Image (spheres, grey):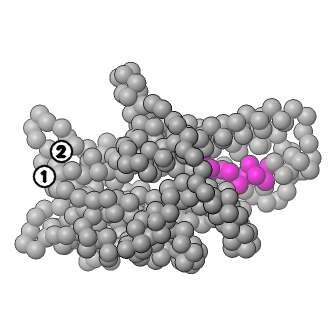
Amino acid sequence: MRFDLPDTPPGAEALRAELRAFLAEAGRAWTPEIRARSWMGFDRDFSREVGARGWIGMTWPKAYGGHERSGLERVVVLEEMLAAGAPVGAHWIGDRQSGPLILRLGTEEQRRRILPGIARGELAFCIGLSEPDAGSDLANLRTKAERVPGGWKLNGRKIWTTFAHKSDYMIALVRTSPAPEGGSRHAGLSQFLVDLRLSGISIRPIRDLAGADSFNEVTFDDVMLREDDLVGAEGAGWAQATSELAFERSGPDRYLSSYPALSLGLDALATNPVPGAEVTVGRMVARLSALRGMSLSVGGMLERGEDPAVEAALVKDVGNVFEQALPEHLRGLLDPEDSPAELRALLAALTQLTPTFSLRGGTREILRGIIARDLGLR
C-alpha cells in the first residue's frame, strides 16, 4: 500500500474561505446536538442551498448537473462541512457514492433522470446492503429480484438502512440468480435503483439508544421494477458494490466526525490552559494530519480511476479509532465545571454516537480482515 499526497488544486484556499463564510451564517442556529450528528444530520433545505451553490456533484459532467471541478476541490467542501458539523445527510450518500455509481455504470437515461436532482440537493439516497440474519456477510443476503414480463419483481428485507424513511431512492444489492454450486457465493448478485415510493415497499424506523430513528428496516413485497432499473451488469453487483465502498470508507467523514469537539476543546484550553495538555493535543493533531494525508491520497487514486479498496479500509479503520478516542482525550484534559456549555453538550452527544463510528460503513473486524488479506496474513 502507498499513500502519495496529491497537489492542492489552484483556488482551494479561496473556496475554503467562501465555505467558511457560508457555514458561519448558515450554522448560527445549529445546536451542539446537530453539530455532533454532522453528516448523520438530515436537512433537505440545507442540502438544496448547498446544491444551489454548486457544491454537490462537483466533479460530474455539466451535462448531468455537475460542475466539472476537481476531486480535491470537493474534498475541501467535505472538510469544511464536517469541521462545522453541518447537517449534510440529505445529500451525503447521493453525492458520495450513489451518484458516482450511476455516473460510472448507469444507463444514459438513469444519468439524465437522476444525477441533476442529486446535484441540486433535491434527491436523497440510501444504501440497501445489510439484511436480517446476514450481518456483515453480504454474500448471504436473501432479497431477490426475479425476471418477469416487463421488468423485475423484488422481494425481501433490508435492515439498518440509514435514512430510508426520508430518502427518495435506494441502491439495493440483491440476488438475481443462485450462486453456482461449489463456486463463489458472490456470483449472481446485482444492483438496482429502487424508487422508494413504489407500491409494495414498507419502511419501519428503528429507534436507537440515543433516541434517533435514522436506521430502518425496509420490506419489499412483490415490488415491480422496470427492466432499466438494473444498475450496471446483471450478476456484477458484488464487484460494483465493493468498488463503491472505496468512496464510502476513505473520505474525511471517517476521521472528522468528532472534529467540532476538538475545535471547541482547543478554544477552551486556550482560555484555561492545563499543564501538559500540549502533549495530548500534539498527538491528536499529528494523527489528524496523517489521516488527512491518507484520505487525500485515496481521493487522488479514485480520481485517477484506480480501485483503492484496501487503502480505503485502512483509512476508515484508523480514522474510526481516532474519532472515537478524541472525546475521551478532551474529557481527560478539561474540567467540566470550567468548560463552555456548548462543549459539554457536544461531548455528551458524542458519547452516545461514537460507538456507531466503527460499525457504519463496515465493521472494524471486516475492515481488518480486508487489510490482513492484502498483507498476506490470512
- Which secondary structure, mark 1? loop
- Which residue is at a point 37% across and 44% down the rendered structure image? 306
Q: Which residues are magenta?
A: 255-265
Q: Farthest front residue?
A: 10
Q: Residues within 10 Å of mark 2 (few under 14, many from 20)?
A: many
Question: Alpha-carbon distance for marks 2 and 1?
Answer: 8 Å
Q: Mark 2 and 1 residues: CB-CB less than 8 Å, in contact?
A: yes
Image location of residue 221, percent across then percent down: 22, 68
Whether residue 258 appears in this view of the structure is yes
Image location of residue 339, percent across then percent down: 86, 52
Per the picture, the main secondary structure of the magenta-coloured stretch is: helix
Q: Which residue was labeled with disc 2?
A: 187
Q: Residues within 10 Å of mark 1 (few under 14, many from 20)?
A: some
Which quarter of the figure is the C terminus placed in? top left
Which of the two residues, 269 or 70, is positioned nearer the viewer here?
70
- Whether residue 354 appears in magenta in the rendering, the answer is no
Question: In this rendering, would 318 be left or right of 116?
Answer: right
Q: Amino acid at mark 2?
A: Ala
Q: Which mark is residue 177?
A: 1
Q: Which mark is residue 83?
A: none
Image location of residue 313, percent across then percent down: 45, 39
User: So how many labels did they put on this image?
Assistant: 2
Which of the two residues, 244 or 133, is positioned nearer the viewer here?
244
Q: Quadrant of residue 94?
A: bottom left
- Which secondary structure, mark 2? loop
Question: In this rendering, would 58 be left or right of 255?
Answer: left
Q: Is residue 251 above or below residue 33?
A: above
